[in-house]
Amino acid sequence: MAQKIETERLNAYFGAVHAVKDVDLGIPENKITAIIGPSGCGKSTLIRCFNRMHEVVHGARVTGKVMLDGKNIYDADMDPVLVRTKVGMVFQKPNPFPTMSIYDNVAAGLRLNGVKDWNRLDKTVEKSLKLAALWDEVKHQLDASGVSISGGQQQRLCIARALAVEPEALLLDEPCSALDPIATAKIEDLLFDLKNSYTIVIVTHNMQQAARIADYTAFMYMGELIEFGVTKTIFEAPDKELTEKYITGRFG
Amino acid sequence: MSLEIRTFRRRKLVNLLASAAALSCVVVALIPLASILVEVAVKGYGALSWGFISNPIIPGGGIGNAILGTLQLVFYASLVGLPVGILTGIYVSEFGDNVFGRTIRFFNDVLANFPSIVIGLLAYSLFITYFGFSILLGAIALAIIMIPVVANTTEEALRMVPNSLREASLALGVPRWKTVLKIMISNGKAGMVTGALLAIARITGETAPILVTARYSYYWALSPSDPTASLPVAIWFNALDQSVTAQQEAWGAALILIILVLSLNIVVRLLTRRNRFSNSYQMVKKSWLRKSKQSA
Amino acid sequence: MDMRFRGASFRPKSVRALGGDFAFHLFVGIVAFSAFILVWVLVAQMVYGAYPSMKALGFRFLTDATWDSGKGQFTVIPLVAGTLTTSGIAILLGVPISIGIAIYLSELSPAWIREPLSFVIELLAAVPSVIYGLWGIYFLAPVLSHNVDPILVSLLGWTPLFQGTAGGFSKLTAGVILAIMIIPTVASISKEAMMAVPNSQREAALSLGATRYQTTRIGVLTYARSGIFGAAILGLGRAVGETMAVAMTIGNSPTISWNLLDPGTTMASMIANNWGEDLGDPFKLSVLLEIAVVLFVVALLINVFARLVIGKAMKPVQSGGAGL
């Protein structure tokens, strides 16, 4: 099974705080991998190392390697700007650009990268909105403000926006935690459809969600990767006692 | 996407240029500041001497009467401006949740940045017949300038006090007025002191309102009902006069004035290192922003 | 319901305490009220003082083009033109620089430099206007006149804006000083507006592969633009009312001309420059007061507008509810 993203002794720090400790993890290609664990275990920090967003925070740093298709994204000759066009991200709280229309939001990534051709923009916007299961709902109001739609729709808009730059992997940081169950279900469905073309990593504090949609699951605790494996195995016959405790709800 | 590689280098270049442009804006703004400080220091330094500070303009060629005039103006203005400003600020903060309170608040904000020459003329219009051109008239004008500034900063200072303190005090049966007083003294004190200092720094440097009210004089002002010289007006009157004494007076006064004003600002900064009010603009502007958020 | 308050309301306050509260409320209210009323009384008085001039000049004050004090022809038009010109220059030069400073402080500077640098920039606001004027006379005006104006004339002399040189006292010089004077205000409010932009916006842009500059452009500036606009209007208000620095550098000639290198005059500087001499002549005095009334109205409109714009700008962005 091909690894899209592979980390090698990955450590992440916020100043003196050691948030991610010596993680060796392989994210399989074109599958959904969930990262679960109690609050503060470092799962968000971990995925933010995958698209070099972690270092944006003042005082944050990373040691170790993160290989994207075999190339270390932290190499000296790799520019974070380019890395981020290859690995997209959707955040916990939907963050569409409020001063832009739905169309402009989705097209934003393309325009940032220099695409000006209307045709291409039109086609990509439509394709991305369809992938994000939002096209039918907004196709008649593409000029409406990005924030004039509901929370769940905004989050799908953010997914469309991230997909428009045609990344190779998509990272989602607790994308449904601000949404109601119906909106959550819509997003879970579309992720399921997406995994055929994209490698998906989803951080979630909702174990049932991981069990529902993820092919693979990684369990983190206090900055360390405790266990990784096929979801079914993790939930039914985990290797480590800590994993079992978490799964059965004995803590966190 | 191959297109990134094409546009990528251009984007990085633009990024670099933009950052350089932003930094150069900072430098461009700092140059006049440095230039002013240097010019005033160099040209004013030669004028300073004990005689300069203690002699009046006539006789003696000093600016002692201007210094004293400024001190007197600030003193009398503060006598009125500080209490009224503080009380207005208390009203708006503690009792102001009504139309009247909001009107006053709005009005204060507008008045705080108003052309000071107009304010001087306002004072002149009504009070000239009672006071004549005098320190008192000037003090009235300056007080009018002070009041909105002090009211704003007082309101800000009181607003920073968490409501739970008020509620706890009231719940214990302490009367409203005592509660407010206690809060002011214990928690609001720092904010009010810095607000007062900033207001004083501001009026010390004001020229136009004094020009039209307290006018100018070459002599010691013997009583508050006399006109007087003041540091800013001394600069104004002597600026274009090329004679040596006039230039001395102008630059010397400028040096003393700038030392006074900057010292006050620096003292305020040292006092308020923990909170964000580091000068009058920040305070007025902060209260501006905060109030706008509420009224929105 | 909050148990504390239930208990408090049942506890009867002593009459003295009640009376004390009432008296306090009343006292503070009266002071605030009087201060408020007093200002409007003063305004009325100023208008009254301007009345002889208003009566004599009528609408010509607002429409005549030439100011000729020898012929008793007074008009506010050249003054307004001067005010608009110098303020216009101030905004054109000062606002972009302020935005650049705000961007640097908010987005680019290392954290340790932000506070001290902000303080230093805001020191520009602490320098009294008259000292700006003094510096303007002896430093800026000669520099502009010898070094900058000739370049402007040679490059842009084909426009009516830059013709010949009349020494350093000109609308341009006054405009440049005003630009410097409004920088601290506009920069610091713009900076606040930018810092108030939630980080999620920057993250959204960055995650799409935006450079720092692009992130600032689409993530921050668009979001903060109404706050920045309000800051600019506030700067305009300050420029319009600025008196001393302008009076000392503008050359004081109540003429209208397109040439920025010509001297001119503004409402505020006209009053300041003539206050001494004209006091003997009560009519001239009321003319000055009439100018002040016009200035008052203009400043009031600008400041009120600025406040309303900033108020709307800081409204939190509306978004749809959580759900579908």
Image (cartoon, coloured by chain):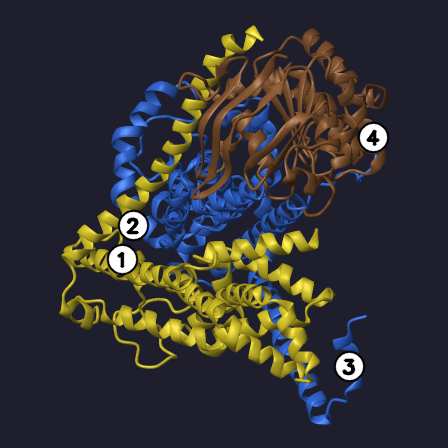
Chain colours: A brown, B yellow, C blue
Q: Residue at x 29, y 40 (%)?
A: C140
Q: Residue at x 36, y 40 (%)?
A: B29
Q: Amino acid at mark 3?
A: Gly
Mark 4 element type: helix
What crowding class fits label 3: few (fewer than 14 Cα within 10 Å), some (14-19), or many (20 or more)?
A: few
Mark 3 element type: helix
Q: Which residue is mark 4?
A: A185
Q: Nearer the viewer, residue B216 or A195?
A: A195
Residue C134 — which label? 2
Foreground: disc 2 or disc 1: 1
Query: Picture quarter containing residue B247?
Result: bottom left
Question: Are both tags, 2 and 3, on one chain?
Answer: yes
Q: Nearer the viewer, residue A167 or C208?
A: A167
Q: Where in the figure is residue A200, as x and y percent of width and height?
A: 67, 21
Q: Are marks 2 and 1 in contact (CB under 8 Å)?
A: yes
Report the chain holding disc 2.
Answer: C
Marks 4 and 3, how far apart at CA: 48 Å
Q: Which residue is mark 1?
A: B254
In the picture shown, does residue C120 fall above or below A73? Answer: below
What crowding class fits label 1: few (fewer than 14 Cα within 10 Å), some (14-19), or many (20 or more)?
A: many
Residue C7 — which label? 3
